[in-house]
Amino acid sequence: MADIHEECGVFGIYAPGENVANLTYFGILAQQHRGQESSGIATSNGVGINVEKQAGRVDRFTEDQISRLRGGDPQSFMAIGHNRYSNTGSNIYENYQPFVIETVFGPLALAHNGNLVNPDQIAKRLKDAGIEPKGSSDSELIALLIALECKSQPNFEKAIAIAAKCLIGSFSLVIMTRDQLIGLRDPWGIRPLSLGRLNGSHYLLASETCAFEALGAKFVQDVKPGEMVVVSNNAEPICCQELTQVCNKLCIFCFIYFASPGSILYDRLLQTARRHMGESLWVEHPVIIDDPHKWIVCGVPNTGGPAAKGFADASGLEERTGFIKNPYVGRTFIQPDQRLRELGVRSKLQVLPREVMRKKVVVVEDSVVRATTSLQIVQALREAGAEEVHFRVTSPPYKYRCYMGVDTQYSKDLIAAEKSVEEIRRHIDADSLGYLSLGGVIGAINKEKYAQPIPPDCFCSACFDNNYPFPIPDEQGRFVL
């Protein structure tokens, strides 16, 4: 339960003869953790594109909306979906996705996961061409730029590829025309995108493989950095390297927090990777155990749970459920307003006093970013009667702003950018505080015995080490080369 969240989840399906509207509903429902400010589904029946978008979670879709998306005669055979967290652009209807726009080749629908660092350059180019966006999302800029390129290119695929070469930042795109489903991943490989197969002959694209599991589909492969996948004519997908791969820098926070524990990234099940992080935390930051019966380990729901299990197994301490997560409260930490984050913690988490009373508690958390949550957790445990509270974190100190789609827009929001570990410990009033090192995180991920080791340079860890995969703008918006 970190104080941060990534921007959006995307989904696409090409499945003639299937109820693609309903399948897309379940596909984005499985990725609800990636954003809940708005959701949307667009479908194609080969003639036109229908779209339904709304504020809030996927389960707010009505049967009437789904019925309209199914289409009449002919019935829809292809769809894309989106969950939104507004890292850039306010939470207004004009920013909800998928975007549906007209081009010289016909309608196009686009869903985007990521964040551009050069939106002003794209906006200027569009303005020079007489094109004004309706909202304030960089995702809309991508859609409009593709439409502009369609005027000078022979087909959608070429227009998308040419437009993408102008983009700097993270982007996993799922795009739908009247008769094609297209996926494209940025050449740095920062945001995930995977290809799946349903019933042997139908194909899906999703930010996370948990969406495939929800539909009974099978994982086929990860889309490579810079690779475009095109599905059409009920045939096998065509994969081509449209953008030169710069590197493969999947966001390391996907492993630590963002992605579902049931998803697979780099051939790793995230539940297992997080358990190994907990084991490594014990190695790097053990506690001095006087009386084992006085000590318990509690994970902060939900992502702290697997790591708490690993810490308990490695230390021999008892793991207990010290917190109950209220399933009826929204994910307060993906709300963009800091005051809402602060007010939401107590309603989100309930400490169980009889589990922690007169105990020395090791709290295992995935990250400390603003420290709002961490402070209130420690306070709540002490109020519940815990004798000591020791905080353990499965990531290094989060020191640097993310430009790739995580809602840490300013360094002043990051407590580790201003305070030492000891100062943070005092700030949250913990008896001790230990962060897992970056080497420890990668080592834990590589403990998976069934997969090949992943080199350290295959992760984006700029939020920890200030090593960005591409040029970033300075405070005045100028690019630092």
Image (cartoon, rainbow, N blue to C red):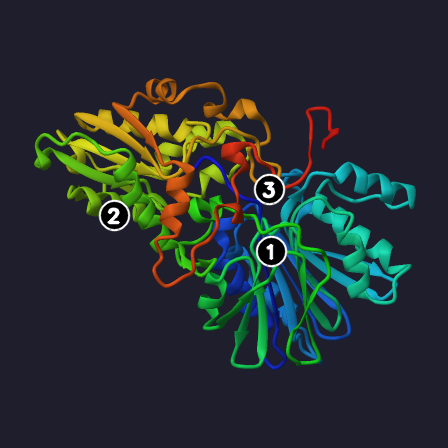
Tell me: 419 left or right of 241: left
Q: Residue 217, image x and y in percent?
A: 48, 72
Q: Measured along the vertical axis of the image, is residue 47 above or below residue 366?
A: below
Tell me: 477 left or right of 256: right
Q: Amino acid at mark 1?
A: His
Q: Measured along the vertical axis of the image, is residue 276 above or below residue 432?
A: below
Q: What residue is shown with label 2? A: 309
Tell me the crowding category of disc 2: few under 14, some 14 to 19, or many 20 or more residues within 10 angstroms, Cα based. many
Tell me the crowding category of disc 1: few under 14, some 14 to 19, or many 20 or more residues within 10 angstroms, Cα based. many
Q: Which is nearer the eye, 70 or 220?
A: 220
Q: Amino acid at mark 2?
A: Lys
Q: What residue is shown with label 1? A: 82
Q: Secondary structure at mark 2?
A: helix
Q: Amino acid at mark 3?
A: Gly
Tell me: 419 left or right of 425: right
Q: Residue 452, image x and y in percent?
A: 43, 60
Q: Secondary structure at mark 1?
A: strand
Instruction: Report the residue at 45% width, 42% height from top.
Output: 331
Determine the CA span between mark 2 and mark 3.
30 Å
Quadrant of the rendering where the N terminus is positioned: top left
Instruction: Report the residue at 20% width, 26% height from top.
Output: 388
Q: What residue is shown with label 3? A: 405
Determine the CA span between mark 1 and mark 2.
33 Å
The part of the image, by quadrant, that contains residue 297 is top left
Q: Secondary structure at mark 3?
A: loop
Quadrant of the rendering where the C terminus is positioned: top right
Q: Which is nearer the eye, 263 or 286?
A: 286
On the question of residue 35 being in view, the answer is no
